[in-house]
Amino acid sequence: MRLDHLLVWLSAKGEGSWSQFRGAVEELDVEQGEESPDSDDEGEQSARGTSDLAAYQRVRLALQRLGHVEFFANEVDRRWRVVPPTVALFPASGGDGLLCGARSPDLLEALGNLDNVEVTGSAAPGMPQRILLRAISRNVVAAAARRLGFHVQADAPMAILSATPAVRDSATWYRGQLPETPGWIVHRFSPSRLAWAKVAWEDARAARAGLFRFVMGHQRFHYLRWRGESYSVPVQVGKYAVMRRRRDILAYNAATQVLSVPAACRPPLLIERALVLCSGFLPRFDQSLGRVEYASVLPDVARLSAELLQQEVR
Amino acid sequence: MGVRSVWPAFRAIAAAVHCWWNFVCVRITCGKLKAQVESPELSGVEAGAGANGSASAVSPRSAASLVRFNPNLYPETGSTQEAADLVRTESSAASHHAEPYERRGGERPADAECQSDAVVEQADGPGTSTRVGDFPAHATPVLEKADGQAVQQAIEPARRGDEEAVANRPPGKPSGSEGELQKVLDWNREDDARGEFAQASPTSGEVEESGPGAGDSGVSTGSPSGVAAPVPTTPPHNREQRRRPPVYRAPIGGPSTPPNLSRATDNASTSPSRGRWAPVEVRVLFARGGYCTVTLLPKRPPGLRDELTVSSDIGELELVALADEWYQDIAPENLGRLLRAGFVWTDEGSGQEWLLSGREVFVLAASATHRGYVSCPRLVLGREHVVLCTTSELPGVEEVLQEAGCPVWTKLDEADGAPAGWVVLRGIVPQRPVRPSSDADILNILRPLAEIEIALEGGIRLAHNSWLLGHPPTIRVYGNPEHTERVLIDGQEAVASKTGGYTTPEWDEEGGHQILCSSTNKSYSLVRCKAGWRFWPAYSFCLTGSRGGTLEFAFCGPLVRPVSASHRTNSEADEPESIQVPRSNPVLLGSQPGQVLVPNWRRDIRSAQCLAVPPFAPVWALPAQPLNCDKGANRVLLIGERLAVGSGKDYRQLSEGTRAPELRRWCRLILDAGRKGLAVDPPNSKTEQLWREYRRYARSLWRKFR
């Protein structure tokens, strides 16, 4: 319940600073949920294969992936802002929609009073309750949601993927300058081993291509070297950008509709959000395989994700 | 009449003259003292003591000290009594502020600590020396010359007026008879001699530790515990950097004052940071499997940067902001030693210091601002605590906990995550108050006081004392149940639920509420969540279109919208919804003739859908070239609501205007799809009927404008 409380608190506040968010996570004693590895842009992975991310970072990532709250986005640098209440319609279902964004006690009560729409909540570790709206058709769900003032996004996963740039679309990268002050520890991402290796600063500067990580204290920056130029990119984008088209990164089981990726290669935020919104649940970590699994992913969504990630689907 | 017969009369006259002279001198002295107290130009310790109104400057010992070292003021014994009386009278008002803290005997506010510390220093250290230095170097203690009667006259008021001082006298110190009083004087003289010795020793801003009984053990120093904490004598901004961490001073027993329970929970907002000193709390987090983590939680004073590097004995440490009032907790490797010895961290840039007084027992309580348990002043009845103690203190700790009625607790040692040499005791819930020990015993913090407090716990707190409607706090009353009378919420008697929270029928309604219990009150308010959420572009990207130009989209959670002028101007206007256009059916038709849209596609990704925001409500999606498409694979898709064609108006009411090309195109696409014989999707009679109406309407219109 604590993550639900946090989401209600965030909804009541609307927006705020990172400090306020961390304070709320502390005050509301938000549960940790199951530890699953996150990409190492956020924290080092321990030997156990799980992340040593702080609790509030895990909460942030969960809320971000589920499309409830946006952090550090365009207009909210070092801040957060809640997403308006939205019903994200599932791609192939007859009339299922997922509640995303802001929640309030009044709003949840109004949802419960809707005619012709069944509202069900499912608890899962590490995330707020998944609230599902179900009716005989998506139009009924959409109409009911609009009556309550909700936004509606039809076929949310496909919509997000269709507007997301591919990982090698250099037009969406920001040019950056490699840090030149002394004291930085530099790592280079090895696409073949899917791991970071320590290199000299001069190697990063001389490289024509590659993803580099600069670490000093708690500061951590990622730079993509591409055709001799430096770009500042999210680490997930950088990893897939430098990775060759391979068949062993993305694995899709059409029968179970599960798409999986190695834990070290989570997709970029928007692509991952699309995959998460296929089911409304956070991905499951398969410790034996070391892979993160996304459930209820339709073939079209898997195909489009692979195309954006410049990878083959196994 | 001989000399022998005149001599008594002469002595009587001389004594009367001396009395008068002494009276005048004492008045002058008191006036001087008063002026010193009130003077803003007072320097160093004197200023501190005077400003704080401490009792030290007016303690009997100090009075006696004044008497003995000023031959001009108190040349004869008869004046000593008056001097002591007058000085005490002068001091009684000044010491009034220090009295409550003396009675508390336990924790004390920071300013009180400052007062007491200044007092001690004035009594034993530089303060005394400064005062002594005011007197002539050749001054001789007058009382040493006095006869026995005069001595008794001098001492008697002091004994009458300061029984506490005598009572607190160290064992073996004399009292009662004249001879004993003489010994008292000797004892006082010895103490003053210690004061002189202290004066002779250099002081460099670092205060010598003075444990219980050190220095003036018999006379109240104004310190609540009788023990001085090592507080620098100079103002924080002037003093040198500390070279030694402070040592925690245990509280002593005595009449209790209400414990500030909220310090454990609300310390984020109330914990005072004295000048440039900020506290470092201890925090314990419990993980699954009975494992615990002990960390240090530095307070973040207002105005300090998010990230700091502080210097300490163990090297440099990085502090990163956790919240507005706290830095992220850290776990140094040698935490056990740090907890025992205390430490000082310094930010060289701002001069800010963080202190933790070393001790062997810590009490922690569940925090309202942090996960886990955070250090608090002492145990409180009925509340769950964690006790962190050294292994050497463990037997004593457990004994006191049993006295306090703690039923059971769990012991976690080094193997479970406790610092080296320390033990974590979990599940401490004291059930009965225990009288604190009269001496400065660290275990006094484990002896809960019999008091109550109204606590507001849980719920969703939006501001200081306002909670979200629907998520009110749980109202609890902690402390001794015998002290708990009726609990009233908004004047109505509240009843305790099974979980211990107090409620009334209207306690969780919107608005402000007042809680009253045994002269303690608290207020809270419940506010409604204001819905003002709008779409806003969290991320936006420009993509290249298949027909040239750019496609710009904005994301906000699961929402995807084409970027419009309102986004660029940061307008709060709601955006129209986008729809996905399947690649096989890229032509959108509305219910009104002329409503045709062929959206632009992104060029780089083959399998991507096309997102479009048509300026009309689309009903159908058709193949791009209906006559040339594969009839078996393509359909006429119903993608919107089943809107009646032409909004139910007759086609004859339409006039051919400037939109004639769109009208013709709309008609032609429908007619071509009909000629091709494309099936509709979804394939049901309603959809087929609607499609037939559209075809009929388009045919009629085509004929009209042909």
Image (spheres, coloured by chain):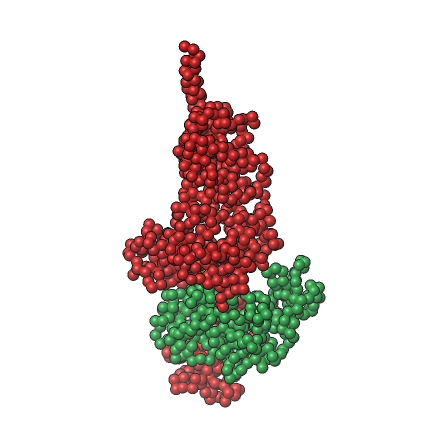
Question: In the picture shown, does residue B373 fall above or below B193?
Answer: below
Instruction: Residue A14: give x, y in percent of width and height.
Output: 45, 61
Q: What color does chain A have in the rendering?
A: green
**Above or below: residue B216 compared with residue B476:** above
Q: Which corner quadrant holds the N terminus of chain B?
A: top left
Q: Please say if B586 is above or below B355.
A: below
View extreme (top): residue: B1
**Dividing the picture into quarters, in which one does residue B496 lie?**
bottom left
The residue positioned 42% from the left and 39% from the top of the image is B167
Residue B8 versus residue A167: which sits nearer the camera? B8
Q: For this rendering, which residue is in front, A307 or B240?
A: B240
Whole-percent x, y for residue A179 in the image: 65, 60
Q: Position of residue B432 (x, y in %)?
A: 38, 55
The location of residue A274, given as percent across then percent down, is 51, 74
Q: Which chain is red?
A: B
Q: Is residue B655 above or below residue B532?
A: below
